[in-house]
Amino acid sequence: MNPRNPKAEASELAGPGLTAYVLEPSPPAVTAEPFFADDPATPEPTSDGTRTVTPTSAGDMTWDDLVGSRPELAEFAADHWLGARRALPPVPAGYPAARDGFHRLGYSVVAEARRASNSKFGLRYTHGGFGTPFFGDDEQVRVEGNSIVVQRGSSVETATITSIAAAAAFVGVEPTTVAAEHDSPELGDVNADLGTTEEAGRFLGEWYGFSWAVIEELRLTPGAVDVERTQLWPGHFDAAIAMGDSEAGKRATFGMSPGDASHDEPYIYVAAWGDVDRSDPYWNETNFNGASLDYSALLAADDAYATTLEFVRGGYQRLNS
């Protein structure tokens, strides 16, 4: 396996005169506070005449624009959730148990590798799964399918996922639950087989790629206040941001969950920090203060991306009207 640099790979494919932006973290490691991580979909100003191509509406052109003139890039764009978006896949058999295994692994090993280096434990979408931003000496720990991957500089090592103990030994960390969050899973028996599968791991990769594409565009909502960076929180296992004025009671968390104890399948949610108008059927969730949209609705939609973006922006508009 070769080392990955998603931004460099995409820029090379885009060709001369274009600087490509992606949804995945890329090296080099960021050592500056407060994030210690790159913001890969957010374009930086250019002074050399190059144009930016982005997975959102923030650049000079979108990946969909580029694919329109260069259809040979459609497969790459779709495979990385940059554009030419394909339909979401069906939920694989045995998904909840396998998802929970990946959750425990992500929380106790993958996130812990980053936390031990710089105190940060937020994760990201990476192709075929999820992983850390680059940290330390250009190091990344990620999950691809049913494999755990450690990339250090130009070196890449991979191992099949079995138990937490085996994965931790491979990565070189002590598995812990130090970075406690609400809904964090128990460490459990670190020597037991996690029950993860290649199919479920790839499904999570598709879900998080889709999630990042939606949330990065949500961050650009006109007039949005105090917008966070997109993170995969290892305690919840959700891709999420918060935005809105908290002092005015208008802030909410906007997230994409792979499922949890109350939802076997993935779902979209808006969790309001203040009061909501329960007379509005939009606020339909009974497990928390907010609204949710089930995965089945996305599978039935003509355009799952547009449907999801409309749903989460609808929540923001309701809270901020």
Image (tube, grey):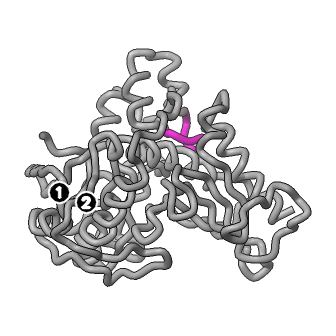
Q: Is residue 53 magenta?
A: yes
Residue that carries the numbered disc 1 in the rendered image: 162
As shown in the figure, which amino acid type bears the numbered disc 2?
A: Leu
267 to 19, vertically: above or below: below
Looking at marks 2 and 1 on the same chain, the residue that comes earlier in the sequence is marked by: 1
- Residue 73 figure quarter: top left
Residue that carries the numbered disc 2 in the rendered image: 194
Question: What's the residue at 46%, 36% (across, down)?
Answer: 82
Callouts 2 and 1 close, C-beta under 8 Å: yes
Question: What's the residue at 26%, 73% (across, down)?
Answer: 112
217 to 275, vertically: above or below: above
Task: Estimate the spatial distance between the alpha carbons at disc 2 and disc 1, rounded to whole Å.
Answer: 6 Å
* Label 1 secondary element: loop
Nearer the observer, 17 or 72: 72
Q: Quadrant of the C terminus?
A: bottom right
Question: What's the residue at 67%, 70% (across, down)?
Answer: 288
Nearer the observer, 96 or 137: 96
- Residue 32, label in figure: none
Q: Which residues are magenta?
A: 52-61
As shown in the figure, which amino acid type bears the numbered disc 1?
A: Thr
> Where in the figure is residue 176, as x and y percent of width and height?
25, 79
Q: Residue extending furthest right?
A: 279
